[in-house]
Image: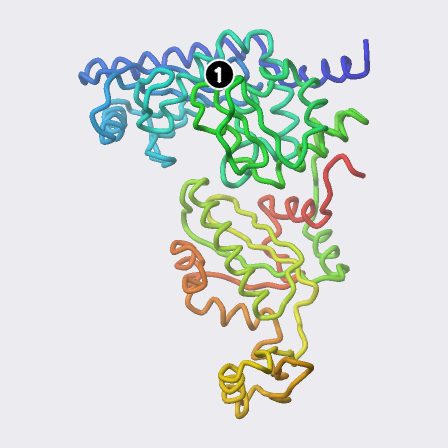
């Protein structure tokens, strides 16, 4: 038995559901599907409730009690049918539902310890026009049924490998590998080890397909043509940095396989430890803390967070501060924290501002007129070689002062999302370095420790 065989057995020991766990889940799943189907029959809705996703595929991981129940409507008339089906379920089953949104609405609920997503879609066959993105899901299940048999544990290994690297999930927050992408990658390569050995050789871009036909062109780092819809790239949500990290991890694993790739040590970082880390750091860490009563659903929220963080970063750099890197953390309910690492939170008072080339007469005249009597002008306007310039006095040299001015209107005019700009107006705090101490709980302290360390888990 090789070291990998031993390691694989140990890893799977914590991933594969027990017989008791599987029986409990399947009994509940059957009851839930029957209950939804009874409502459809009683309400005269032509369609059927079906179990899909990782539970239906047999690739779910122990402890992850999430069920995807799809209401597959027989006939398409209009997209309003999707909402009508959800309203019917909500009004006739006494579960506590939350309505969520992806490409269209769906219902979320938690019953007897199980998390359920109830998703409406239309019945389509391979090659037929789809009416909503979720119409493909039943086709995915049908396509996988025969092909995934015997490879379920290989998928579990890949999911755990990716989850440990924070690369599992196609949602905006992660930008990684979806469950379906994991499954078809394992089918394509025939197992986890074979996939990892292939991935270590992937280039800047990689294109995969089960078909011999020339695939449609996509501008994504990884392209995997959906076997049930040749117009779709299953890996479209995968970000470039996530793709690169996966390749690096594959190389690291092949060279030195170990449990660190499947299970990271639990952090126990105290606020005091983080404060000392921040005080001793040669850079400045800027925090924008935004608080609210109840955030949007995670995928909507993270779209707002990424857009807003990038918009603010652009303005910080335009002012002359140098952003080395940035990130965001959220408890996804009441608190979001934007983090910017700056080479310094204070910049020089003077800045050189270049003007037009000397031969552009009209532009030069406008430049001179603009800066000749400008109260911010320190030196100039003058010529250096073939270009006019001035030395200007910056309006803001302290990052905290600049941020308060920048966010005076919530940041709406600079590209902060509408929802978050309102929250910023209502309650926000701009903090520098150890001033974040009062917020180092709820997981922020662990996230920040990892981020400041700034290296993959297998590099010690």
Q: Is residue 287 above or below residue 259?
A: below
Eyeballing the image, is 351 above or below 434?
below
Q: Position of residue 185 (x, y in %)?
A: 59, 21
In the rendered image, which quarter is residue 193 located in? top right
Residue 385 appears at what percent x and percent y? 69, 81
Q: Residue at x 41, y 24 (%)?
A: 116
Q: Nearer the viewer, residue 266 or 41?
A: 41
Mark 1 lies on residue: 55
Q: Is residue 437 visible?
A: yes
Does the image show residue 39? no
Q: x and y percent of residue 442 in the render? A: 58, 45
- Camera-side residue of 70 and 194: 194
Label 1 secondary element: helix
* Front residue of this view, candidates 109 and 415: 415
Total numbered circles: 1
Residue at x 45% of width, y 45% of height: 301
Task: Give the image's coloring scheme.
Answer: rainbow
Residue at 50% in and 21% down: 65
Identify which residue is drawn at 53% across, 9% down. Answer: 147
Residue 232 occupies quadrant: top left
- Work out which quarter of the rendered image holds the C terminus and state it: top right
Q: Residues within 10 Å of mark 1 (few under 14, many from 20)?
A: some
Does residue 82 appear left or right of residue 271 in this picture?
left
Judge by depth and name the residue closer to the eye, 124 or 345.
124
Q: Is residue 39 left or right of residue 236?
A: left
State which quarter of the image contains the N terminus.
top right
Residue 144 drawn at (x, y percent):
49, 13
* Residue found at the very far bottom of the displayed protein: 373
């Amino acid at each position: 038995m090789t070291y990998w065989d031993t390691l694989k057995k140990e890893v799977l020991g914590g991933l594969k559901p027990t017989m008791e766990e599987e029986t409990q889940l399947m009994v509940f799943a059957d009851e839930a599907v029957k209950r939804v189907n009874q409502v459809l029959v009683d309400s005269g809705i032509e369609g059927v409730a079906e179990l899909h996703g990782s539970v239906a595929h047999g690739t779910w991981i122990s402890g992850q009690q999430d069920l995807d129940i799809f209401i597959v409507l027989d006939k398409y008339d209009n997209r309003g049918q999707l909402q009508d089906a959800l309203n019917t379920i909500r009004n006739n089953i006494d579960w506590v539902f939350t309505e969520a949104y992806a490409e269209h609405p769906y219902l979320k609920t938690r019953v007897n310890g199980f998390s359920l997503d109830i998703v409406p879609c239309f019945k389509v066959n391979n090659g037929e026009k789809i009416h909503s993105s979720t119409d493909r899901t039943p086709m995915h299940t049908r396509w996988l049924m025969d092909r995934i048999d015997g490879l379920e544990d290989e998928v579990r290994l890949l999911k755990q490998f990716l989850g440990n690297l924070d690369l599992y999930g196609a949602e905006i927050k992660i930008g990684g590998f979806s469950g379906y992408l994991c499954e078809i990658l394992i089918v394509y390569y025939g197992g986890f080890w074979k996939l990892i050995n292939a991935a270590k050789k992937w280039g800047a871009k990689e294109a995969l397909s089960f078909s011999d036909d020339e695939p449609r062109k996509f501008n994504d780092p990884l392209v995997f043509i959906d076997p049930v819809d040749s117009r779709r790239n299953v890996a479209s949500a995968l970000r470039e940095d996530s793709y690169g990290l996966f390749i690096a991890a594959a190389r690291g694993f092949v060279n030195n396989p170990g449990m660190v790739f499947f299970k990271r040590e639990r952090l126990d970082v105290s606020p005091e430890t983080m404060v000392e880390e921040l005080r001793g750091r040669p850079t400045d860490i800027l925090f924008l803390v935004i608080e609210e009563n109840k955030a949007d659903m995670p995928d909507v929220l993270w779209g707002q967070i990424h857009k807003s963080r990038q918009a603010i970063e652009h303005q910080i750099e335009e002012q002359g501060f140098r952003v080395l890197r940035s990130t965001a953390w959220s408890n996804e309910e009441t608190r979001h924290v934007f983090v910017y690492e700056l080479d310094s939170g204070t910049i020089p008072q003077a800045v050189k501002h270049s003007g037009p080339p000397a031969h552009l007469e009209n532009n030069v005249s406008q430049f001179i007129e603009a800066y000749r009597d400008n109260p911010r002008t320190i030196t100039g306007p003058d010529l250096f070689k073939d270009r006019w310039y001035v030395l200007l006095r910056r309006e803001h040299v302290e990052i905290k002062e600049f941020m308060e001015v920048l966010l005076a209107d919530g940041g709406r005019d600079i590209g902060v999302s509408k929802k978050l700009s309102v929250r910023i107006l209502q309650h926000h705090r701009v903090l520098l370095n150890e001033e974040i101490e009062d917020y180092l709980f709820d997981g922020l302290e662990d996230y920040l420790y990892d981020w400041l360390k700034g290296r993959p888990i297998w590099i010690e």
